[in-house]
Image: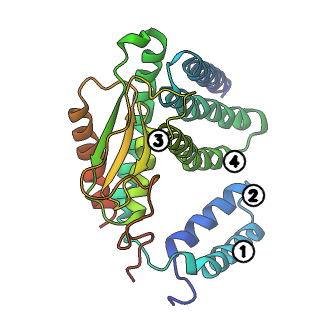
C-alpha cells in the first residue's frame, strides 16, 4: 500500500501547485487586462480551476493524513459555483450603470458600449421587468 | 403528499448538503438531516410557487459537460492572460437571443456562461428574451453566440422540459 500512498502524495502535490498557478495567473490577469469588464474574467477563472485544484489536493491530503474522506471541499465547490457568477454579474451591472451615467472616471474599454437588445424591451439593469415576464416557475 | 413535501428535489439536496456539512455517516446526523429536508421546503414554499420539471439524467450529463468545459477553457484564458498583448485582444459584447422560457433555466444558462471562462453574463433583457454577455477574446462573435446556443442552450432545453 505504501507505493499507492506515494503516488497519491505526488498527485496531491501536483494539483495543489496547479491550483496555485491558476490563482496566480488569475491575479496577474486582474493587474494587466485593460478595463473592468476584461478584468472581471481573471478572478472568475481563479475561483474555478485554481480553487478546484487546491480543494482536490485537500481531499487527498485529508484522506492520507486522517484516513477519512472529507465532504467539506465538495460543499465549498458547490457554494463557489453558485456565488461566483452572481458576484461577477453584480459588478457588471454596476459597470453598466456607470457607463450610462457617462462617469468620466471609467472608459467602456475595447468592447465599446453595450449594444441594445433586439425587441422593444431594454436591459433589465436599466428598466423594470415587463409585466408578463415570469420571475418564478408558477406551473404546478 | 404535496403539502408535506412540496419540493422533493430540494429536500434531497438539503439532506445531502447537511450530511456533507456533518462529514460523518452517523444515524443522528441522518435523522436531523431528514427533519431539515422536510421542514425547510415547507417554510420556504411561498418563494417557490411552482416546480420546474427537471430531467435528472440530462442534468447530470450537462453537469459533466460543463465541468469538462471549465477545465479546458481555464487553460485557454490562462494562455490569453500570459501571452496575448492587450492590443491584440478582441473583447466584444454578445447579445444572445434565448429560447428558454423558465426563469430557473435562464439562471442556469447565465451561470454556466459566467463559469466557463472567457465569457461573463452581464445582464438579461427586461422581457427575458436576451442575455448580454461580455467575451474576453472573440474573433467571431456570431460563431461564439452559435456555440453557446448549440452547446449549452440546446442541452438545457432537454434538462428543463
Labels 2 and 3 in the same subunit: no
The quarter in which the C terminus of chain A is drawn is: bottom left
Task: Same chain for labels 1 and 2? Say yes or no.
Answer: yes
Residue at which label 2 appears: B22
Give the residue pinned by disc 3. Answer: A100
Q: Nearer the viewer, mark 2 or mark 3?
A: 3
Q: Check contact, mark 2 vs mark 3: CB within 8 A.
A: no
> How many residues crowd mark 1 within 10 Å: few (<14), some (14–19), many (20+)?
few
Mark 2 is surrounded, within 10 Å at the Cα level, by few (under 14), some (14 to 19) or many (20 or more) other residues, namely some
- In primary-sequence order, the first of circles 3 and 4 is 4
* Callouts 1 and 4 on one subunit: no
Task: Single out the mark in the foreground, 1 or 4.
Answer: 4
Mark 4 residue crowding within 10 angstroms, few (<14) / some (14–19) / many (20+): some
Q: Give the residue at mark 4.
A: A72
User: Distance of mark 2 from mark 3, alpha carbons?
Assistant: 47 Å
Q: Are marks 3 and 4 in contact (CB under 8 Å)?
A: no
Describe the element under mark 2 as helix, strand or loop.
helix
Residue A109: give its label. Answer: none
| Horizontal and vertical percent position of residue A130 | 37, 67
Residue B31, label in figure: 1
Q: Quadrant of residue B125?
A: bottom left
Mark 3 against mark 4, which lies toward the viewer? Answer: 3
Let me know if marks 2 and 4 both belong to one chain: no
- Dot 1 falls on a residue whose secondary structure is helix
Quarter of the view holding residue B56: bottom left
Decide if residue A86 is on the left or right side of residue B139: right
Disc 3 secondary structure class:
helix
Image quadrant occupied by the N terminus of chain A: top right
Amino acid at each position: 500500500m505504501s507505493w499507492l500512498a506515494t503516488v497519491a502524495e505526488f498527485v496531491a502535490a501536483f494539483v495543489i501547485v496547479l491550483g496555485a498557478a491558476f490563482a496566480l495567473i488569475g491575479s496577474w490577469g486582474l493587474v494587466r487586462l485593460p478595463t473592468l469588464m476584461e478584468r472581471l474574467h481573471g478572478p472568475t477563472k481563479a475561483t474555478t480551476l485554481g480553487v478546484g485544484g487546491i480543494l482536490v489536493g485537500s481531499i487527498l491530503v485529508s484522506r492520507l493524513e486522517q484516513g477519512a474522506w472529507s465532504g467539506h471541499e465538495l460543499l465549498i465547490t458547490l457554494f463557489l459555483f453558485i456565488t461566483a457568477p452572481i458576484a461577477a454579474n453584480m459588478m457588471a451591472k454596476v459597470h453598466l450603470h456607470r457607463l450610462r451615467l457617462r462617469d468620466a472616471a471609467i472608459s467602456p474599454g475595447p468592447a465599446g458600449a453595450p449594444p441594445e437588445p433586439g425587441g422593444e424591451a431594454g436591459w433589465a439593469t436599466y428598466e423594470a421587468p415587463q409585466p408578463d415576464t415570469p420571475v418564478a416557475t408558477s406551473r404546478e | 403528499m404535496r403539502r408535506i413535501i412540496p419540493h422533493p428535489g430540494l429536500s434531497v439536496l438539503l439532506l445531502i448538503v447537511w450530511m456533507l456539512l456533518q462529514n460523518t455517516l452517523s444515524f443522528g446526523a441522518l435523522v436531523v438531516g431528514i427533519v431539515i429536508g422536510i421542514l425547510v421546503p415547507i417554510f420556504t414554499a411561498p418563494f417557490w410557487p411552482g416546480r420546474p420539471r427537471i430531467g435528472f439524467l440530462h442534468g447530470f450529463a450537462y453537469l459533466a459537460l460543463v465541468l469538462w468545459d471549465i477545465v479546458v477553457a481555464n487553460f485557454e484564458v490562462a494562455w490569453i492572460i500570459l501571452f496575448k498583448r492587450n492590443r491584440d485582444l478582441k473583447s466584444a459584447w454578445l447579445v444572445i437571443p434565448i429560447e428558454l422560457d423558465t426563469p430557473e433555466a435562464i439562471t442556469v444558462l447565465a451561470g454556466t456562461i459566467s463559469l466557463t471562462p472567457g465569457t461573463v453574463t452581464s445582464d438579461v433583457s427586461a422581457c427575458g428574451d436576451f442575455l448580454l454577455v461580455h467575451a474576453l477574446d472573440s474573433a467571431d462573435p456570431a460563431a461564439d453566440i452559435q456555440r453557446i446556443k448549440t452547446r449549452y442552450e440546446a442541452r438545457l432545453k432537454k434538462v428543463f422540459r
